[in-house]
Amino acid sequence: MQVGNLKEKIQVSLRNNIVKIPVIGEYGYYSIMALLLKLKYYRVLIRLKKEYGKRKIKVGFIVSEIAKWKGQTLFDIMANSEDFDPLILIIPSSHELKKEGNRIDDIISEKVLYFKNSGMQVKNIWNIQKQKSFSASDIGASIIFYQQTWDIPPAPLVENVAGHALTFYFSYYITNSFIPALEVNMYLHYCIYRYILLNIEQVKYYQQYAKSINYAGKMIGLGHPIVDSFYLNRNYKASKNYVIYAPHFSFKYDRGAGNELPFYSSTFLEHGRLILEFAKSHPEQNWVFKPHPRLKTELVDNNVWTKEEVESYYHEWEKIGIACYDSHYIELFLESKALITDSNSFLTEYSCTGKPLIRLIPGNGETLPPVNPFFKKLYDSFYKVYQEKDLYEALNMIVLDGKDPLQKQRIENVKETHLAESYAAQNIIDYIRDLLTK
């Protein structure tokens, strides 16, 4: 097979954001690409070693959606250091570009303002005229963090950034399922300098599915910044006892050819109104509504609910409790007494609180992604809801009566995962310092 054909296949894979396991020899395009990227990273590392200690190293965090920003503890520890100068790099998401093209300027400005109001350095790196992100040289960061393996582009392509910066990746979610095509073999996994995972055990497990690909970098087990807040507040005592409803957007519905989802976890169409009515009938409880940021647009864009219906539903929640539409939900978790959700990413995060989780499951669970083996025992200690009667039983027992018969089992299972037993941000900054000094 000629290199030209291989390159074409790589470009197709890039557009699809998934790299297929190559069936080519060691001299194939993947191997050549890996060697070129390693050389680029080596040159960047040598340069940074010479500069380290003489100036602050600029570190960029690429953010396309505010609700997916999960690196606050890492940003903060870098901002308070003498070695690093962190900033947020704003881009639009791919679905915003498709549906909100004429509003991109305003949408980006809103994101920039959000981080500015949080006292953080932030920069828009989206060139509206050229419809692409700034070049890596224009960005000027020597270390760049990615948080998702899709939306690349509009994020700067890793192989281009590699000539100017070391690239790191930790996902905006804690991996609750394990699908090799999504967790190991996406294009970014192939090109990234360091892929940060929860621990060494997870690294070893993932590596079993990556042996046939020549990676430019490697996987490292340092933890996840999103659980740092639980580690730092491990003795926190809740006083507000929020009951949080966090619905996902992935309801099963005909989205049209090419837009189908690989898995469905949302039960919003079955339980969304019921849970709202339950909340309205029990105002003595402190309620929080934390929907996935795409829920509103998915309902409207797929003509499942009218815009008026959606706005009315959201407004009803805002009248009876707190509505959280950004990434500032950790304090709400810490102050809660229970979570009701069908969101996959919250399953593991919320477990760090040790509090009961009512898991809403669509159908018989056949549309859910396969469970990450590291968390199977933990997920078995949730209160599983399949039908309406299961929902009311769980709500009455946990929310109204305050009973939690699975508590002991769940807390033991959380300890087995070692989820919130280290300070990931500190681990990551120490790792980078070691890279630059050894």
Image: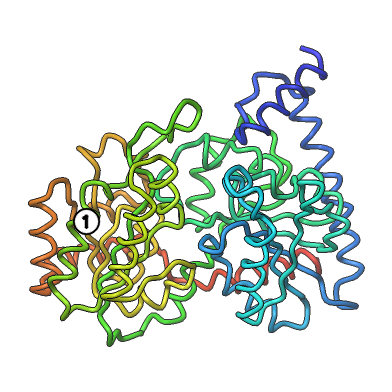
Question: Nearest the camera: 377 or 256?
Answer: 256
Q: Position of residue 249 (x, y in %)?
A: 38, 49
Query: Residue 427 is drawn in which quadrant?
Result: bottom right
* Residue at 19% in and 69% down: 279
Query: Residue 278 is drawn in which quadrant?
Result: bottom left
Q: Position of residue 409 (x, y in %)?
A: 20, 63
User: Which amino acid type is marked by label 1?
Assistant: Arg
Quadrant of the image containing the N terminus: top right
Callout 1: SS? helix
Q: In the figure, 113 relative to 124: above or below?
A: below
* Residue at 78% in and 26% down: 29
Colour mapping:
rainbow
Q: Is residue 403 left or right of residue 120?
A: left
Q: Is residue 104 left or right of residue 271?
A: right
Question: Nearest the camera: 41 or 293?
Answer: 293
Residue position for label 1 = 273
* Residue at 52% in and 55% down: 200
Quadrant of the image containing the C terminus: bottom right
Q: How many marks?
A: 1
Q: Is residue 107 left or right of residue 353?
A: right
Q: Position of residue 83 (x, y in %)?
A: 78, 78
- Among all residues in the image, which is located at the extreme front? 308
Q: In the figure, 366 relative to 81: above or below?
A: above
Question: Nearest the camera: 160 or 40?
Answer: 160
Query: Residue 6 is drawn in which quadrant?
Result: top right
The crowding category of the residue bearing disc 1, from other C-alpha atoms within 10 Å (few below 14, some 14 to 19, many at least 20), is few
Q: Position of residue 51 (x, y in %)?
A: 90, 70
Question: Nearest the camera: 422 or 340?
Answer: 340
